[in-house]
Image (cartoon, helix red, strand yellow):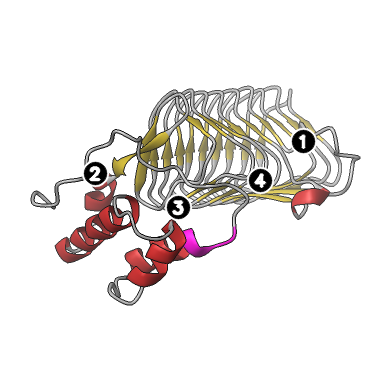
């Protein structure tokens, strides 16, 4: 049997694996599914059509699966699906989807959500993502795997954050961020590439060189649009990471892109990793 503290309240119908540990004063709704080896430390509230993957740890006062903060929500049946081995710290909130976004909010595996972070309705969050304290995702945001969002940052509705991107602390992100890009600022602008993240991925030296050259050609050339430059570069760089970056730019989006500030210097590629 699961290790359930006597003060916890578990609704009839909740599906709880035998190895789950539920601490004092937790409240679990009837449509919640908890996989093996999950730990709810105390005072955790989980409701709605919420599924959480194995070995996830949830800390006090987190609220998962309650109704979205969307005035258009009318109680339609929607889901929150959270992957495995996540760490969800104090006061984190995650909401299920809405009819306007596919009725699903989905979080990958091996993520860290620090205290007071928020994942709004219809967000899609990849694996190994980190949200530092008080970072917030508005509705319909997509975050690629390995992205890091700094503390006190806010991401606008429908923005896409690319794989491996880095968002500096206290940034307001209103536009899409390319994979492996670094942005920062009150209204964030593109500040270069997340080279530290690229090196931590143990990518070949040639691949990092290629990404840097593509970054320069995309954002510091004067001919054509960003999309036409991306199309032209696609045939010159076979690396999967470069192709993914160019495909991100070519994909449909309701937002424009974070670009370098007007006075940004052309990057020097002679010191490429």
Q: Earlier in the sequence, mark 4 or mark 1?
A: 1
Callout count: 4
Question: Can you tell which mark lies on residue 68?
Answer: 1
Residue 203 seen from this side:
no
Q: Earlier in the sequence, mark 1 or mark 2?
A: 1
**Dominant secondary-structure state across the stretch colored magenta:** helix
Residue 167 in the figure: left or right of residue 84: left
Name the residue: 29% across, 42% down: 192
Disc 4 vs disc 1: Cβ atoms closer than 8 Å? no
Q: Is residue 132 above or below residue 271?
A: above
Disc 3 on helix, strand or loop? loop
Spatial separation of the CA atoms under disc 2 and disc 3: 15 Å
Query: Mark 2 packing: few (<14 Cα in 10 Å), some, or many (20+)?
Result: few
Q: Position of residue 7 (x, y in %)?
A: 74, 23
Disc 2 on helix, strand or loop? helix
Q: Which residue is mark 2?
A: 196
Name the residue: 35% across, 59% down: 223
Q: Position of residue 107 (x, y in %)?
A: 58, 48
* Magenta span includes 250: yes
Disc 4 on helix, strand or loop? loop
Spatial separation of the CA atoms under disc 4 and disc 3: 16 Å
Query: What range is drawn magenta here?
Result: 248-252
Q: Position of residue 271 (x, y in %)?
A: 9, 49
């Amino acid at each position: 049997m699961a290790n359930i503290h006597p003060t916890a309240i578990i609704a009839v119908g909740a599906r709880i694996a035998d190895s789950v540990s539920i601490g004092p004063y937790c409240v679990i709704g009837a449509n919640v599914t908890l996989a093996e080896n999950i730990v709810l430390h105390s005072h955790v509230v989980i409701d709605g059509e919420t599924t959480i993957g194995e070995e996830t740890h949830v800390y006090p006062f987190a609220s998962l699966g309650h109704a979205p903060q969307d005035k258009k929500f009318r109680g339609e049946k929607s889901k929150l699906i959270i992957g495995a081995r996540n760490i969800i710290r104090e006061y984190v909130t995650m909401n299920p989807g809405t009819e306007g976004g596919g009725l699903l909010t989905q979080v990958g595996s091996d993520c860290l959500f620090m205290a007071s972070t928020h994942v709004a309705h219809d967000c899609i969050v990849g694996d190994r993502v980190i949200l530092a304290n008080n970072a917030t995702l508005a509705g319909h945001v997509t975050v690629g795997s390995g992205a890091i969002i700094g503390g006190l940052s806010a991401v606008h509705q429908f923005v896409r954050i690319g794989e491996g991107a880095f968002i500096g602390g206290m940034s307001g992100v209103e536009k899409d961020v390319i994979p492996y890009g670094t942005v920062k600022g009150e209204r964030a602008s593109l500040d270069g590439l997340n080279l530290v993240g690229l090196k931590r991925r143990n990518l070949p030296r040639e691949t990092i060189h290629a990404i840097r050259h593509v970054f320069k050609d995309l954002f510091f050339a004067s001919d054509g649009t960003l999309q036409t430059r991306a199309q032209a570069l696609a045939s010159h760089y076979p690396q999967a990471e470069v192709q993914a970056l160019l495909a991100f730019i070519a994909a449909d989006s309701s937002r424009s892109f974070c670009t370098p500030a007007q006075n940004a210097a052309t990057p020097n590629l002679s010191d490429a990793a």
